[in-house]
Structure formats: C-alpha cells, structure tokens
Amino acid sequence: MKRFLGLLFVALIVLVLVLLVTRPGLLQSIWLWLVGFIGYVVYFINRGAKNLLALFKQEPAPSPAASAQDDAAASDLGKIEKSKPEPQGKSPLLERLPETYPDAWEKLGDTAVTVLRYLDDGTTTLGLLYLGNRFFCYTLEDSHRDLKIPGQTRIPEGRYPLSINGNLTELTQRYRNRFPWFEFHIEIKNIPNFDLVYLHIGNSHQDTRGCILLADGVNAGSSEKMVSQSQRAYERFYRSIYPRLTSQSSLEITVLNEDWVERAGIRQKHRVPAIG
C-alpha cells in the first residue's frame, strides 16, 4: 500500500512538471484545485487502507481445546472452595460474648456512680467520674500504697454502697456554713480498712485523707497534679445524688484501677487470661 501511494505521488509530480513546461498558463489557473484534489485522494486511500487492515486483524475465536481447559480450571476452583474446612465452634473471644454468657459479664457502668482511675504519679491519683454511662466530672485521690499510710492512701478498687453520714462532724458543719444547699456528707461505706470516706471539695492530694475529690477541671501536666472548679462539680453531684439517697434509693459506686482500659473490652467478673 505504501508503494502504491508513493507511485501515485510521483505520477502527480511528473504531471505537474509536464504541465508547467508545456502549458504554464493553465497551471496557474488550476493549481489550487489540483492541490486540494490530491489531498482528498490521499485521505480516502489512507482511510480505506486502515479499514482493510482492521478486518484482517480480528482476533480468532477460541479453540475448543482452550475452552475445555478454562472449564476444567473453573471446576477445580469450585472443588477447592468446597473442600475448605468449615470453622469448628467459636473462638475463645466469641465464646465470651454477653449474648452467650450474660451472667458472666460485669458492665462498666453498672452502678449509679463509676470512678475510672487513669493516672497515679506516686502522690496523686486522677480519674474520671461517670453517673450511669455519662461522663460527669474529674476526680482526685491519694496514691496507691501496698501498705496503708493513714491520710495518704487511696481506697482499694471495688464496688461499695453509698450512704448519708448523719453525724454532725466538724467538716459537715463547715460545709453547712458555706453552702445553703448542703445537709450531710455522702459517704462510701464498707471499704476494708477505711472509714469516713466522703466525696467532697478540694484541689490537691493535700485536701484529702483517702476521700475522693470532685472537679470540673484538671491539670495533669504540672509536677503537682491538681484539679479546679471543684465546688461547682461537687454541687452538681450533690444535687443529683443526695435526693435519691434521702428517698431510700440503694445506690452504689464502682472504683476501678488504671488497668480498667485493658479490661473494658470483653471481660468477666473473674479475670480471664489474655488470649495468645
């Protein structure tokens, strides 16, 4: 095809030269028409050549042998899928789901009040207090000690009843003088080796002797951990919990140590060994 186009082009050049020599006047009147005609001829010849090449380059239909090989491969794949073993039973993790063993579970916010400790720097413990499953305020306590030092040791982790201490102590009288809404302290009862543990107002470990301080702000970045806006948080807490205690409602508080994060997923009342 390229040879044919080349010969055609040479013939047109020869024709133009002949006309140029023999009849120069005629060439001047038709040269624009001649150039356009040559362009159209070249275009249509090119397009026809491409169409012919496309017809001869169509892919051949797959042979029967190739189709048979594809069918055999698909059949083998299906056999492999069917031969995969079905999972036997449930994994140890799934076996401990609450839907399977509801009695073996202990909910994180299962009591009226929950304290989640998250930092102990050896002097001060910081935590988060929840009412039900709703975050309420921050907490501050003394540090953990293997051997109790009176006035410098936080209470042990556990679940304890809340009660109203009806005794008119010196601290109770001070609170009554300061706050018209205050009557008696809310006490955490039945703590082994502890008594008179209150939830009250304060800003640092120097303001507590084993009690839990409540606050709306916390400064965990300073060398001495502190909380702020304690009076506001305590008043909110008191107005929420105290009326329920005076109406003879049975309320409890759960206090969890810093490892509650590791145990907050799927856990039982008695610790389950880590899998793997």
Image (cartoon, grey):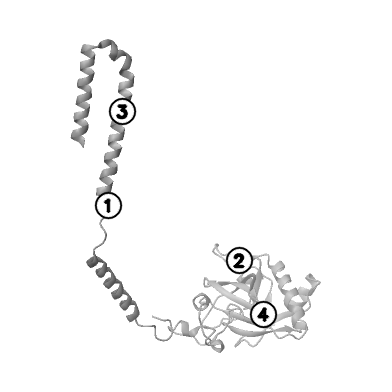
Distance, label 4 to label 1, CA atoms, is: 79 Å
Label for residue 39? 3
Q: Nearer the viewer, residue 96 or 5?
A: 5
Q: Residue at position x 33%, y 76% from top?
A: 78
Label for residue 82? none
Q: Residue at position x 68%, y 68% from top?
A: 230
The residue to which callout 2 is attached is 226
The residue to which callout 4 is attached is 112
The residue to which callout 1 is attached is 58
Q: Residues within 10 Å of mark 2 (few under 14, many from 20)?
A: many
Q: Would you say the residues marked 3 and 4 are in contact, meaning their CB atoms lie under 8 Å apart?
A: no
Q: Residue at position x 73%, y 83% from top?
A: 164
Task: Please state which of the two labelled residues, at mark 3 or mark 4, is closer to the viewer.
Answer: 3
Q: Would you say the residues marked 4 and 1 are in contact, meaning their CB atoms lie under 8 Å apart?
A: no
Q: Would you say the residues marked 2 and 3 are in contact, meaning their CB atoms lie under 8 Å apart?
A: no
Q: Quadrant of residue 204?
A: bottom right
Q: Nearer the viewer, residue 154 or 93?
A: 93
Distance, label 2 to label 1, CA atoms, is: 82 Å
Label 3's element? helix
Rendered location of residue 208, percent (x, y): 64, 74
Q: Quadrant of residue 106?
A: bottom right
Q: Would you say the residues marked 4 and 2 are in contact, meaning their CB atoms lie under 8 Å apart?
A: no
Q: Residues within 10 Å of mark 4 (few under 14, many from 20)?
A: some
